[in-house]
Image (cartoon, coloured by chain):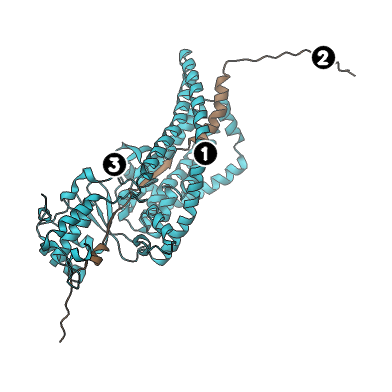
Chain colours: A cyan, B brown
Amino acid sequence: MTTVTDLSPRPCLVPGTTLLGEYQESGFREPAYLIRRPDGQVVQLTRLLYLVAGAADGTADCDGIAAAVSEAYGRRVSAANVAHLVEHRLEPCGLIAGESLDRTEVIDRTPLLALRFRVPLVPARVVDVIAAVLRPLFMLPVVAGSLAALVWFDWWLFHHGLSRAMVEVITHPALMLLMLGGLLASALFHELGHATACRASGAKAGAIGAGLYLVMPALYTDVTDSYRLDRRGRVRTDLGGVYHNVIAVLVCAGIYAATGFEPLLALALLGQLEIIQQFIPFVRLDGYWVISDLVGVPDLFGRIKPILLAVLPWRRSDRRVAELKRRTRVVVTTWVCITVPVLAVNLFLIGRAAPHFTAVAVATAQAQARVLGTAVSTRRFVAAALAAAQLVLVALPVLAGVLTATWMSYRSGFAATDWNGRRRRPQHRRRRRRLLRNPALRPTDPKGNSHATLHP
Amino acid sequence: MSTVVFEELSIVEMEGECAVELPARHLMSLININVVNAINLSAALNVLTVGSSATSAAMQQISIAQL
């Protein structure tokens, strides 16, 4: 039988774990601290836990850690306190090696509406090199000049019009491939913008990859390390993508100025539509992260459920609501009150349109498959490429929709799952029972009552 | 001189200590294929008519007076 004394008597942080310091300019009443695990996952902790984690170097036992932490924390922390916090807080998060690091018991913690179906394409080291090359784009004069040039270009485009560009695109089907390629290139450049801004602000960008988000294909950049930045750095990382969209639009305008190739103007317009789309704050696009970083709350979606429940008079205020500063709580509550109905309406509309959309998609796919076959047999390769592209474009939203619906159904089956992806785990209760059996590590309250007395 | 006795943390206080895994920051750009599809609808119609021709004929049944 395993007992609590099997816990490491000298707690030690998992090798590769990094203490990131305080989460700067946060929206919490009490300071929050960050630690990054070797797998890149960032964990937010209270100051006491951060101090315990920082003292757990593998050389000090619980008494030694307690002494060091007590001095830094400003009040007495006992060895039993340390043992409790290590076992019940730090081990389950994978920060300290222990029996709870049995990863088979760790539930998938992908938050709701996060990018789940993804695959990395460009490794972090390559992204880092490219970001270093693109770094001059984030110099202030370049940024100011680019934004001024965009305003001027839009004014010119408004008077020039897009009719000729659209006619050319429609009458020359091969240009469809150009538009598609342009959109993909623009999206990739957008991601490099995030990575470059992240690097320029002092954090390390991760890999760039592709995935399926809700019902659309998407590219992504892993900038989890930007949690360590101050508010300015975080927001700059968020906006780096749309800034690169601005650059892409200006490149299109420049090539048009040199060649007079009208379809580039249509591509420039699509680039600007992408900028507007990115500011949607209701799903995890750039607009969401901008709000999150401005208010200093890193997990807005995790606040939806507690904020909604807080309106019930018989419910005690949840920690995730109470810990927010007053002004932050107002902003987050406003966001919740707008986001929830918007998401609900969109979910309903998507669900209602799904059967019709799927039927049309199947019919279109069949038609395009016939076109593809004919085009290949007659060696019309442009038409074949167009048909193949159309097949992919039709299939992706259907595939993404099915995957998303399946995943959401799976998630909704767990009543104990919150919106941030955490579940109560039976192993916590088992560990608590083991703790209660060991009087040496049983913490006491100020009145001398034991853990067992308080929680029989 | 009074002696200040510092008590260790109580269970309630320790329950207030929390560690939360933050969501990964995957900054995304959606590839807006709806726009492409809209344009592609027109383009596909054009693709299907490449190399084809159409003729029409109709009997004239109404006499039109020419001045």
Using the rendered image of the protein, determine whether residue A268 is visible from the camera's viewpoint. no
Report the residue at 47% width, 45% height from top. A246
User: Where residue B51 appears, x then y in whole percent?
Assistant: 57, 15
What residue did someone put label 2 on? B61
Mark 2 → mark 3, Cα distance in angstroms: 76 Å
Q: Callout 2: helix, strand or loop?
A: loop
* Real-space CA distance between mark 2 and mark 1, rounded to the nearest whole angstrom: 50 Å
**Above or below, A340 relative to B30:** below
Q: Residue at x 47, y 52 (%)?
A: A339
Position in image of residue A368 (x %, y %): 49, 22
Mark 1: which secondary structure? helix
Tag 3: amino acid = Ala
Q: Nearer the viewer, mark 2 or mark 1?
A: 1
Q: Chain of mark 3?
A: A
Out of A166 and A443, give the one closest to the viewer: A443
- Residue at the outermost bottom position: B1
Quadrant position of residue A429:
bottom left
x, y percentage for residue A62? 12, 61
The type of residue carrying mark 2 is: Gln
Check disc 1 and report the residue beneath it: A352
x, y (%) of residue A346? 50, 44
Residue A124, numbered circle: 3
